[in-house]
Image (tube, grey):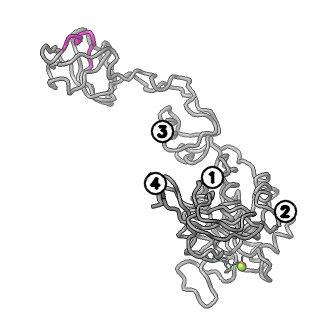
Amino acid sequence: MISIEEHLDRILQAVHQLPPREEELLAGRGCVLAEDVASPVALPGFTNSAMDGYAVRAADVSGATGAAPVTLPVLGDIPAGSTERHTMSAGECWRIMTGAPLPGGADAVVPVELTDRGLEQVRIDAAVTAGRHVRPQGEDVAVGDVVLQAGTLLGPRQVAVLAAVGRDRVRVVPWPRVVVLSTGDELIEPGQTPGFGQVVDSNGLMLTAAVAAVGAPVRRIGRVRDDDQSFRDALADALEGADALVTTGGVSAGAYDTVKAVLSRSGTVQFDQVAMQPGKPQGFGVLADGRVPVFTLPGNPVSALVSFEVFVAPALRQMAGQPAEPPTLEAVAGHDWSSPEGRTQFARVVLRREGADGVDWTADLAGGQGSHVLGGLAAAHALAVIPAEVTQVHAGDQVTCRLLTPLGTVA
Ligand code: AMP
Ligand code: MG
């Protein structure tokens, strides 16, 4: 039996960051940037108004008060989107809208609320200082500024700044294209009525959704029969255009454990017993001339999910140039439970907030802990990681949890 760390290390040594690729801007969302992006333009691109109001020379309204207002002639309107270059002289003003270019000669904007909103001429009831309510050209970004550095994760805000500086394409580390392949003679498609001895390929759906949740594109191949030729054919199909392969089922010691039988002969996939519960039988290797990592997960649903979280998700993230390990959460055990000796336990737990200020998290076991129990798995918020040497968890013990769901969805 090998430790989790040993198995994970072997995986993370063998999988590599994918080569950078140019993508359309929105297609790069969720990826890390593979280049420093320097802006070829200034932002704002032109000096503009921060308010709806009147563009003035501050000196012309420096004495304005409610009791002693200043009245100025209005030369016209400058709406946002106006592309004309307007100017004005001392003693004049323009009515101007938020985002519209400031006319030449103006140096401040009087908000509309401080005026009588006049169209031909306007009464101004308050003074403004030079620069007030004006967004100067280049205030945000100067030409040549590096707006984003290589390694930055592209989310909505990063996409926005890239678009604003004129980019419609971007160089990123792509996510691996993943294929999920389910094996087992007993499997049927969701929606079909199971005959005696048949089960729905829930793992195929679960793992496909899990890959998508990590952020990678995924293709699912359902129900591959438990014979060598069927599996070899499916494997050839799966490797077509794949950067990583995840299989489920067929890796135990049974007579029909085809995945193990076929891939053991490949010479590059290694099968181990890993000191964890659930998820003991694990296989990992690389196929297609060392290019495509393959993860052979157990068929038991909980084992498959835990194995995915512990081994596959970190590897996929590393291939995408992102931190392999997700952040964890510290919680306190809500009650006692036992844990197997010599194996790390991944206990399915539900989380709840405790304490007067509601900042502490308590973890309670989520239903049955058998490796086939899907109900408890679906109800769980997290996996509590109980170290191999611990055989008994006591109420009040601190437990480290790997989140299975965003905390915001936990009541
Ligand atoms: P195996 O690892 O193939 O020996 O399967 C172990 C257990 O997991 C058996 O009870 C299978 O019926 C079940 N199982 C295997 N593959 C799947 C799957 N794709 N979806 C749901 N259950 C599965
Ligand atoms: Mg099977």
* Rendered-image quadrant of the C terminus: bottom left
Q: CA distance from mark 3 to mark 2?
A: 44 Å
* Rendered-image quadrant of the N terminus: bottom right
Front label number (4 vs 2): 4
Residue under pointer 3 = 160
Residue under pointer 4 = 358
Confirm whether the magenta stretch covers residue 228.
Answer: no
Image-based side of 286 in relation to 209, left or right:
right
At label 2, the amino acid type is Thr
Tell which circle, 2 or 1, labels the residue nearer the N-terminal end. Answer: 2
Instruction: Say which residue appears at 71% left-offset and 48% top-offset.
Output: 18
Q: CA distance from mark 3 to mark 1?
A: 26 Å
Q: Quadrant of residue 399?
A: bottom right
Label 2 crowd (10 A; few <14 / some 14-19 / many >=20): some
Q: Which residues are magenta?
A: 55-64
At label 3, the amino acid type is Ala
Image-based side of 277 in relation to 2, left or right:
left
